[in-house]
Amino acid sequence: MDRGRIIHIAVFMIFVGIPTSATFYPPLVSRFTNLLQLNPISIWLGRLGVLLVVVYLGNRLLNVLGTRSTSGTHEDASEDMTLQDLDKIEGCIERQGVAWKGTAHLNRNNITNIEVPFDPICPNCQTGFIDTTDDPSFQEQRQNPGYSPKAQSIPVFSCPNNNCGHTVERNAEQHDAARRLFERYARQIVESTDEDYSLRALVENIHGPVTPQAVWKRYTEVVDDDQVSTNCFH
Ligand SMILES: [Zn+2]
């Protein structure tokens, strides 16, 4: 029995039980009421008791109706569970030919931490890039004899997969830009309400298990944005 019910019963006994017993068994309490001039008070206590019972029953009725309306949409309740249990969102940012994997850690659907490790990924074959330089070929050097080879070397991310060979120029700001973008999108998901891309809407429209990556996959379907990608998941 919870505390609320005990209080209800106690209130019921004090305001209804005692005045009623005073009405039906006057000898029982008449001595006290006469002694203390309590009769008017007991009448008012009785009326107050009836009022409290009406309020109490009305409250119970509303509770029952409220419970019924939420249990009527049973799917909502189970989605609330997974929404509460969701402890992170995992996504990919694709920018200037490089994919970055980000994780937004959640606690009660609030972002507690954003992680985008420095781990550039080839968006074409999802292999981790290696840092290298794109050196001019011997032929190119001969065509431009005035330039030193070092000045012409371009720092690049290079895909080590021979079947891919994707190479993109790298610069210092790419990782920071990807991190900022991921944070922006993650906050948009978590902090918005009543949008197609709000966390609740995304979770409700996932077909299959709700996973950190499934949320982002649904997000890519909702938003039309080249930088929102899934090309880092495999
Ligand atoms: Zn590749």
Image (spheres, rainbow, N blue to C red):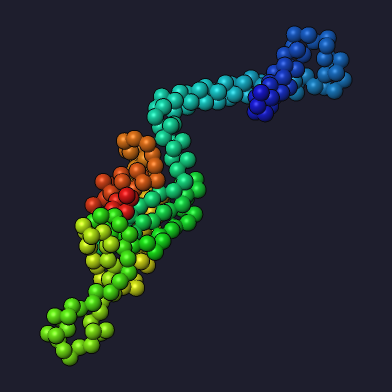
How many numbered marks have been drawn onto this rendered protein structure? 0
Against 157, residue 35 (above or below) is above
Residue 228 falls in which quadrant of the image? bottom left
Residue 47 point in image, percent of width and height: 66, 21
Q: Can residue 181 be seen in this view?
A: no
Residue at image point 24% right, 67% down:
168
In which quadrant is the N terminus drawn? top right
Residue under the image location 46 percent in, 52 percent down: 105
Left or right for 79, reference 21: left
Residue extending farthest to the bottom is 146
Task: Let me know if residue 103 appears in the view.
Answer: yes
- Residue 34 horizontal side relative to residue 142, left or right: right
Residue drawn at (44%, 48%), measured in percent from left and top?
A: 88
Q: In which quarter of the image is residue 171?
A: bottom left
On the image, the x and y values in percent for residue 71 come to 44, 25
Residue 113 image offset from top left, x and y in percent:
47, 56
The residue located at (27%, 71%) in the rendering is 156
Q: Residue furthest left?
A: 143
What percent of the width, then of the height, locates residue 179? 38, 62
Q: Which of the 4 image quadrants contains residue 94?
A: bottom left
Instruction: In this rendered view, identify the residue nearer to me: 187 or 98.
Output: 98
Q: Observer-nearest residue: 169 or 49? A: 169
